[in-house]
Amino acid sequence: MKTGLLFALACVLPGLAQQPAQVKPGFNDTIKASIYADNWFALYVNGKLIAVDPIDFLPHNQVNLDILPDYPMTIAILAKDNADPATGLEYGDHIGDAGLIVRFSDGTVSNAKWKAKAVFRGPVNNDVRNPVVEYEPVPPDWFSPDFDDSDWPNATVFSEQDVRPDGNYVRNDFNGASFIWSKDLGIDNTVLFRLKVEKPNWQRRWNVFPEFDNTCVFAGIPLACQLPAAGQQRPPASQRSSQ
Ligand SMILES: [Ca+2]
Ligand SMILES: [Ca+2]
């Protein structure tokens, strides 16, 4: 009997000893992210929507976030300049300008290595009297890590003088980063950005993950709200923004 018990323990204990200790992610595993968009952004990391600019129009605002990174890390940003979906104009007959700057404390910065695809442009040819807009079809998985962005153009770098950041923008939070957009700061109104951050020697320190499933709330958001049908009018902006 005693021999049998010892034999059983000898069989079980090595298996228990091989169970890895549970390591939870801690705050030291997180990185800081600072993002300033003229006028608005939504940030996806590794295919999940994780942050939306809480001020959609004015004032312009810098957003600071804590992110738990996982490499290789795909950053995808939907950025919108303030522009009427039907004309590309703001304040009646003005062409508004845009801009985006990003810095993560892991060294990731916005620059010309990012991909940038304009999907809503206008008014074409800067024609404010007869404004015409262009829309590009967008694949539903444009923000996913597996999406092939190889045929997207690279971002264009603009100077701080071009973008004129204001609001709570703090220049030192963006050391090493450049303002980027697609080719035209004025008439490219909705732009998709992507960057894959590779850290070949990085290893995830933790091995504990959430049991709950919240993937549905991290899904992609529509790129554009529906335009009114022909003959219908959009409600005034004052009513839309108060909804
Ligand atoms: Ca614009
Ligand atoms: Ca703007």
Image: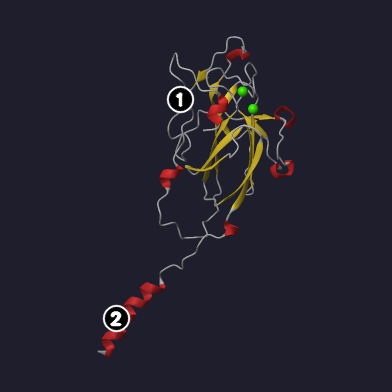
User: Which three-letter amino acid code belongs to the residue tagged 1?
Assistant: Gln
Q: On the rendered structure, is 111 left or right of 7?
A: right
Circle 2: residue type: Ala
Above or below, 119 against 205 in this view is above
**Quadrant in the picture for residue 35:** top right
> Residue 117, can we see it?
no
Residue at image position (45%, 25%) is 226
- Quarter of the picture holding the N terminus: bottom left
Residue 107 placed where, x, y %? 64, 46
Pick the residue in front: 28 or 202: 28
Where residue 238 appears, as percent x and y from the top left, is: 57, 27
Q: Which residue is denoted by mark 1 in the rendering?
A: 226
Residue that label 2 marks: 8
Residue 46 showing in the rendered view: yes
Quarter containing ligand 2? top right
* Residue ID at (29%, 81%): 8
